[in-house]
Structures are given as C-alpha cells and as structure tokens.
Image (cartoon, helix red, strand yellow):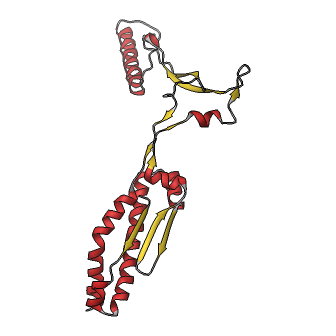
Amino acid sequence: MTTIKVKLDTKDLTKTCGRVSVNILDAALNALSESARHKLFKKASEKLSIEQYKRFESGFEMERGPHSVVMRLTGDEAVNTETGVAPYDLKPGMLKSKKAKRSKKTKDPYMDVPMSHRTSQRGHGTLVPSNMRQAVQKAAKEAKQENAAMRIFKGGKGKASTPQTDMVVKPEGTAQTFRRVSKNSDPSSWIHPGTKGIGVFTEVAQEIEQEKGQVIADIAAEMTK
C-alpha cells in the first residue's frame, strides 16, 4: 500500500451538530492528516538511512478534498522503499552495461566482475585482536622487568634482554578474484534477493482508522460546549 486515504462520514455528525458539523469535520481532517504525516515520517526515519529517508520524503504527496485527505508516494525509489522489491535477475542489466565487453569469437556480451576476499595468515602469522596484542605487550613488559630484577639480584650487569614471543601480528589482507557473467551463466546465479519494504503506510493507515472516530468525538465535544 502506498496510499493513505482518510475519509469522514458526514451523515450522523450533521444530524447531531447541524451546521457546526462542517467545522468539526474540517478540524478533524486537519488533526488526522497532521497526525498521519507525523507518524509516517517518524516511522520512516527510524527504519531508513539518511539517503533512503530523503528519497522517501521527496516522493511524498498529500491532497486535501472536502471530506477526505489522500497521502501517497510517487516515484519508483520512494515506492520501492515502502513496498520492497521482489527478487530479480541481475544478468540482463549487467550484460547491457557500458562496462560489458564482447567476445571476439561469438560477439556475445560478457563482464568480468571483481570480487574481493579477506585473507589472514595462519600459524605464527595468526591475526591477533587488539585486546590480545595489549595482553602480549603487558606480559612482555612485566617479564622484561622481572628479568632485569633477577639480573640485578644475581649481581649481573647490563640491560635485560627483551623476551621473545612466537605471537606475530600480521595485518589482514585482501585477495581479488573475478567472476564472469555471460549468456552461459547458470540461470540461478546473479539473482538479487530483493528487499523488504518498510511498510509504514500500512501501519499508519491502520492506526488512523482506529483513531479517527475518537478524534471526531473529541473535537465535537469541544466545539459544542
């Protein structure tokens, strides 16, 4: 759902409040539409990144009629943010890309896509977390101090040697491989899993529907005192 429509029934209210009912309905619509708008953007801001929120906000429209207010989203990006996107095949778009090349033999398009992989050394080169490095440094310092104290106690001279450790810290690296996309690729490969929509229009539409009777009653009570 990408539309919220708040429509108020005028018959019963007109019988009860007469001419004042027009003003009551107008005030109720204002209150409900403002509440719905606030709820929409608050919920969206809690679920989206800044860039996604900007796209959502730019697609928002609100139209006021005599007895109703309609709020909607327009534009593919804004609508997809709300409703989500079903899984789809990436291959056709990739093979139409300007980066795609042509086979010299068959003239069919193909693309080599770089894939980065993290690597780490094994054995003595095991990547040691920062907290482990600190523990090693602390233990080495304490051992050095203890060694120096023992040399002084025994009457030795000179600086204590730095204790050795078989724990070697090496940074994590990256390796790059390539995967080819072509008409011969497995049909089940390169399928985008799709995205789940935030569904805030659905949530707010249900909330407003539950609230509108009470809003009308409250405004009517205030205006007919």
Residue shown at 48%/51% (left/top)? 80
Residue shown at 70%/36% (left/top)? 98
Toward the viewer: 179 or 152? 179
Residue 189 shows in this picture: yes
Residue 9 vertical placement versus 154 (above, below): below
Quarter holding residue 6: bottom left
Quarter holding residue 34: bottom left
Quarter of the picture holding the N terminus: bottom left
Q: How far across and how far down the image is residue 117, in percent?
A: 52, 23
Q: How far across and how far down the image is residue 133, in percent?
A: 42, 23
Toward the viewer: 208 or 66? 66
Toward the viewer: 191 or 122? 191
Left/right placement of residue 120 relative to residue 219 reads right
Residue at the limit of the structure toward the right, as seen here: 104
Residue 162 vertical placement versus 6 (above, below): above
Residue 160 shows in this picture: no
Q: How far across and how far down the image is residue 183, in percent?
A: 60, 26
Quarter of the picture holding the C terminus: bottom left
Residue shown at 50%/52% (left/top)? 52
Residue at the limit of the structure toward the front, as seen here: 106
Toward the viewer: 47 or 121? 47
Residue 86 vertical placement versus 145 (above, below): below
Residue shown at 53%/57% (left/top)? 54
Quarter holding residue 130: top left
Left/right placement of residue 55 relative to residue 127 reads right
Q: How many marks?
A: 0
